[in-house]
C-alpha cells in the first residue's frame, strides 16, 4: 500500500525541544504532488520538515519514504535518504565562506561521480537559467534575500530530488520576489516531477503549486482538503485564520 | 562541598560528552568510502594555508628569539661548569625535542584552534552545519577530517622550520654577544641530533595535528546560542593547551626516559 506514496506520515505524535507538538497526524504525498501545510505559531508546522528529514528521532507513529520507515534507517542510509531530499531551510543555511557557485555545486562535488568539468557546466547552466549570473561569484553576505532564496533552491534541487521540503521559504521575501520565485520554480517542479511540501503561515502564496492543503492547530490537523475545498473556506478554522477573527476555534 | 561535587559532576559530564563526540567521529569514518576528496580539498588547502603558511613568520620570529636566548645563556653559563662543548646538545635537547614542538603547538592552538572553534560555532548558529546535514553530507567527516590532515602537515612543517630557524637564527643572534665558530656550532648540533629525534617530531606532529583540530571542533560544535561562542572558543584554547602540555610530557617520558 505504502509503495504508491512517495511519503507517508502515519499517526505521528511528537514534541520538539521548543514545545511545539504533533498529535497523531497522518498525511501522504504522491509522486509529483505538492502540498501546503500551514497554521498559526506553535501549531506544529515547524516540526513537519525536520520530522520528514529525519532530524527528529523521538516520535511515535511512522514516517515512510518510498515505503521504507525513516526510523529504521541506519547511519549511512540516513545520509543517503537526506541526499535524495531537497531541503530549503527557513534561513536558507548557505555556507558563508562559499560563493553562490560553490554553494550550489557542493552537493554534486560531495555525492556525484560527475567530473569537475561536468559539475561546472551543470551549475553554470542552472545559475544562468535562474538569472543569477551577475552574482555567481558573490558570497551569501553580498546577496539580497531573494538571491539567497534562489541560491538555496538551486542547491536543494541540484541532485534531482524526488521530494523537496520548503520550510517557511518565502518568509521575509517581498511579494513581488515571491511571485517571481514561485513562477520560476513551478516549471522545475513540473518538468522534473518533484513533489513538494511547503510549510509557512500563508498558503495562499502557493495556490498555483499546491494541490492539497493541511491546516494544523495545536498539533492537530484541523483542515485537510483540495484546493477547491480550501478556496471555499467552509472550515471554521480556515475562516478564522484568514479573516483574523478573535472569537473562533483557534 | 556542594561546589566541589558540582565541579566533579561537571568534569565527568564533560568527559562523557567528549567520549560521545569521539565515538561519533569514529562512526563517521563509516562514510569515508562515500567521501569524494575534491569536496574537502578547498577546506584542506585553506586550512593548510592558514595554519601553516600564514603562521610561518610568527613561528620563525619566535624561534629566532628562543634560539638566541638559549645560546646566549648557554655560552655565558656553560664555561662556568666546563661543559661549553655541549652547546649543540643543549640546543637539540631544548629546541628540537621540547620547545620546538611545544611552542609550535601553542602557536597553532592560539591562531588556528581558536579560529576553527569560532568558525564552526558561527556556522552552527547560522544553521550552516544543519544545511550540510540536510544535504546528506557527513558533517563530522566533512568538517573535522580535512582540518586534521591540514594540521598534521602544517604542524610537522612548522616544527621543522622552528628547529632550523631556532638553531641558525639563534646562532646569528647570539653572535652579537658571543663568538662561536660556525663549523664548531654545526658539528655539535649535527652530532647531537639523531634520527630518533626526527621520528619523535613526526609522532608529536601527528598527535598534535589530530588533537588540536579535534578538540577545537568539539568546542566549535558546542555552543547553542551566540553568547556561548566566546566562552567555548576560550575553553577550546585553554583546554587544548593544557592537554598538549600533558601529552608532550607523556611523549618525552615514553621516548626519552
Image (tube, rainbow, N blue to C red):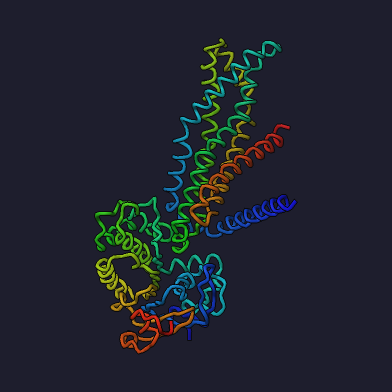
Viewer-proximal residue among B99 and B226: B226
Q: Position of residue B220 (x, y in %)?
A: 52, 51
- Residue A243 appears in view: yes
Viewer-proximal residue among B237 and B112: B237
Relative side of B167 to A154, left or right: right
* Image: A88 above or below A227: above
* Image: A162 above or below B135: below
Relative side of B25 to A167, left or right: right
- Residue A162 appears in view: no
Q: Residue furthest right?
A: B1
For the point 33% across and 55% down, the residue is: A100
Place residue A153 in its image quadrant.
bottom left
Q: Quadrant of the C terminus of chain A?
A: bottom left
Viewer-proximal residue among A198 and B2: B2
Q: Position of residue A98 (x, y in %)?
A: 37, 52
Q: Residue furthest front?
A: A247
Q: Position of residue B89 (x, y in %)?
A: 65, 21
For the point 48% across and 67% down, the residue is: A80
Q: Position of residue A138 (x, y in %)?
A: 31, 51
* Image: B157 above or below A27: above
* Image: A202 above or below B76: below
Relative side of A154 to B204, left or right: left
Q: Tally the marks.
A: 0
For the point 50% across and 70% down, the residue is: A54
Q: Residue furthest bottom?
A: A234
Amino acid at each position: 500500500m505504502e509503495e504508491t506514496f512517495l511519503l507517508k506520515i502515519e499517526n505521528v505524535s511528537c514534541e520538539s525541544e521548543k514545545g511545539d507538538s504533533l498529535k497523531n497526524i497522518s498525511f501522504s504525498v504522491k509522486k509529483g504532488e505538492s502540498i501546503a501545510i500551514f497554521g498559526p505559531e506553535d501549531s506544529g508546522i515547524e516540526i513537519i520538515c525536520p520530522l520528514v528529514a529525519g532530524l527528529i528521532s523521538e516520535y511515535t507513529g511512522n514516517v515512510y519514504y518510498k515505503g521504507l520507515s525513516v526510523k529504521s534507517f541506519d547511519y549511512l542510509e540516513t545520509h543517503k535518504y537526506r541526499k535524495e531530499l531537497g531541503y530549503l531551510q527557513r534561513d536558507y543555511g548557505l555556507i558563508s565562506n562559499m560563493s553562490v557557485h560553490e554553494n550550489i555545486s557542493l552537493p554534486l562535488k560531495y555525492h556525484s561521480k560527475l567530473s569537475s568539468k561536468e559539475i561546472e557546466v551543470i551549475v553554470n547552466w542552472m545559475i544562468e537559467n535562474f538569472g543569477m549570473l551577475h552574482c555567481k561569484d558573490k558570497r551569501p553576505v553580498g546577496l539580497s534575500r531573494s538571491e539567497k532564496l534562489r541560491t538555496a533552491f538551486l542547491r536543494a534541487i541540484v541532485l534531482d530530488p524526488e521530494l523537496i521540503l520548503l520550510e517557511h521559504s518565502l518568509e521575509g521575501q517581498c511579494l513581488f520576489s515571491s511571485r517571481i520565485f514561485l513562477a520560476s520554480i513551478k516549471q522545475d517542479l513540473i518538468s522534473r516531477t518533484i513533489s513538494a511540501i511547503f510549510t509557512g503561515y500563508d498558503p495562499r502564496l502557493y495556490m498555483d503549486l499546491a494541490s492539497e492543503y493541511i491546516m494544523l492547530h495545536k498539533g492537530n490537523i484541523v483542515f485537510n482538503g483540495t484546493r477547491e475545498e480550501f478556496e471555499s473556506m467552509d472550515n471554521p478554522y480556515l475562516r478564522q485564520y484568514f479573516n483574523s477573527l478573535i472569537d473562533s476555534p483557534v | 562541598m556542594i561546589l566541589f561535587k558540582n565541579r566533579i559532576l561537571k568534569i565527568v559530564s564533560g568527559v562523557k560528552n567528549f567520549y560521545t563526540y569521539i565515538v561519533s567521529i569514529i562512526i563517521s569514518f563509516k562514510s569515508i568510502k562515500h567521501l569524494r576528496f575534491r569536496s574537502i580539498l578547498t577546506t584542506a588547502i585553506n586550512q593548510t594555508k592558514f595554519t601553516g603558511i600564514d603562521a610561518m613568520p610568527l613561528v620563525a620570529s619566535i624561534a629566532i628569539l628562543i634560539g638566541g636566548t638559549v645560546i646566549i645563556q648557554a655560552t655565558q653559563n656553560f664555561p662556568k661548569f666546563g661543559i661549553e662543548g655541549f652547546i649543540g646538545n643543549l640546543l637539540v635537547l631544548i629546541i628540537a625535542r621540547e620547545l620546538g614542538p611545544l611552542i609550535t603547538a601553542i602557536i597553532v592552538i592560539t591562531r588556528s584552534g581558536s579560529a576553527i572553534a569560532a568558525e564552526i560555532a558561527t556556522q552552527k548558529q547560522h544553521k550552516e552545519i544543519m544545511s550540510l546535514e540536510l544535504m546528506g553530507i557527513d558533517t563530522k567527516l566533512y568538517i573535522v577530517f580535512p582540518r586534521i590532515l591540514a594540521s598534521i602537515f602544517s604542524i610537522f612543517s612548522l616544527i621543522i622550520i622552528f628547529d632550523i630557524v631556532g638553531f641558525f637564527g639563534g646562532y646569528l643572534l647570539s653572535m652579537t654577544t658571543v663568538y662561536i665558530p660556525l663549523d664548531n656550532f654545526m658539528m655539535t648540533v649535527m652530532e647531537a641530533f639523531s634520527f630518533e629525534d626526527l621520528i619523535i617530531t613526526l609522532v608529536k606532529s601527528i598527535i598534535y595535528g589530530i588533537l588540536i583540530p579535534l578538540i577545537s571542533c568539539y568546542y566549535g560544535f558546542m555552543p547553542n546560542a551566540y553568547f556561548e561562542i566566546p566562552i567555548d572558543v576560550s575553553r577550546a584554547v585553554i583546554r587544548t593547551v593544557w592537554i598538549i602540555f600533558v601529552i608532550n610530557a607523556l611523549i618525552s617520558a615514553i621516548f626519552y626516559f
